[in-house]
Amino acid sequence: MTDDLLIRGPAAAEQRLVLLHGWGADADDLLDLGEELAGRATGVISLRAPEAHPHGVGRQWYDLQQPEWPGLAGARQHLRQRLEALAETLPLERTIVLGFSQGAAMALDVAGELPVAGVIACSGYPHPGWRPRSPLPPVLLTHGRTDPVVPYGASEELQRLWRSAGGESELLGFPGGHTIDPALFPSLRSFLQQHFPRPPA
């Protein structure tokens, strides 16, 4: 472990799952989920957001409370640099990025422009003015239909934008709120298994 990420799984893994936590959480928030979904053969890296949360607990990728989110541009650049640095030990083509809430918005915005194998975005939302650009990795979206924090319609808009740019996407809604529904874990595992590259024969 270092200050800005947590690592689980085999050191010489041939595929990797990168986790981006939500606003006010920390790198350990999604780690158990990542390990459960990825299995023992996949490396799991959970990134810690760069900024302290304004309420004093947890972290943030940028400050959601500031009008027009002035920290977003810097957050994009910082995350892109971190993902590209990870590619020095394992190609991004063997990496899938999973984000929750603010982490999902960052995953789609930044990882969607990199040659990753796929993106899973849970309870996410589109950044203002964001337009995905092809070529795009496949995306799996999940969202609670009664989410009181990020409306379900945000993921519907994400899917619309992704598909309008020629990307492949699937949206799984569930009867719940701002969470990752365990009932969808089989679908998340299936996405990982489907889109991780096949090992060479």
Image (cartoon, rainbow, N blue to C red):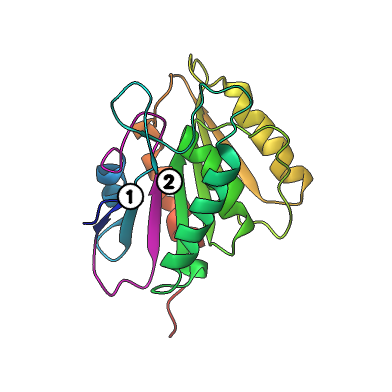
Residue visible at 25% across and 71% down? 11
Residue 197 visible within the image: no
**Residue 145 place in picture, x, y as percent:** 52, 19
List the residue tagged with mark 2. 188
List the residue tagged with mark 1. 37
User: What's under tag 1, amino acid-wise?
Assistant: Leu
User: What's under tag 2, amino acid-wise?
Assistant: Leu
Task: Quadrant for the N terminus, please.
Answer: bottom left
Is residue 28 within the magenta segment?
yes
Residue visible at 52% across and 69% down? 93
**Residue 7 place in picture, x, y as percent:** 26, 57
Q: Earlier in the sequence, mark 1 or mark 2?
A: 1
Look at the picture and state if 79 lies above or below 115.
Answer: above
Q: Please state which of residues 22 and 189 is positioned toward the viewer in this rendering.
A: 22
**Residue 82 place in picture, x, y as percent:** 45, 58
Tell me how far mark 1 sits from mark 2, CA to CA.
Answer: 7 Å
Magenta stretch, main secondary structure class = loop
- In the picture, measured across the screen, residue 53 lies left or right of residue 84, that is left
Start-end of magenta stretch: 9-29
- In the picture, measured across the screen, residue 89 lies left or right of residue 113, that is left
Q: Which secondary structure, mark 2?
A: helix
Q: Residues within 10 Å of mark 1 (few under 14, many from 20)?
A: many
Residue visible at 34% across and 33% down? 182
Contact, mark 1 vs mark 2 (Cβ under 8 Å): yes
Q: Please state which of residues 4 and 178 is positioned toward the viewer in this rendering.
A: 4
**Residue 109 place in picture, x, y as percent:** 60, 46
Residue visible at 46% across and 19% down? 175
Is residue 168 within the magenta segment?
no
Q: Which secondary structure, mark 1?
A: helix
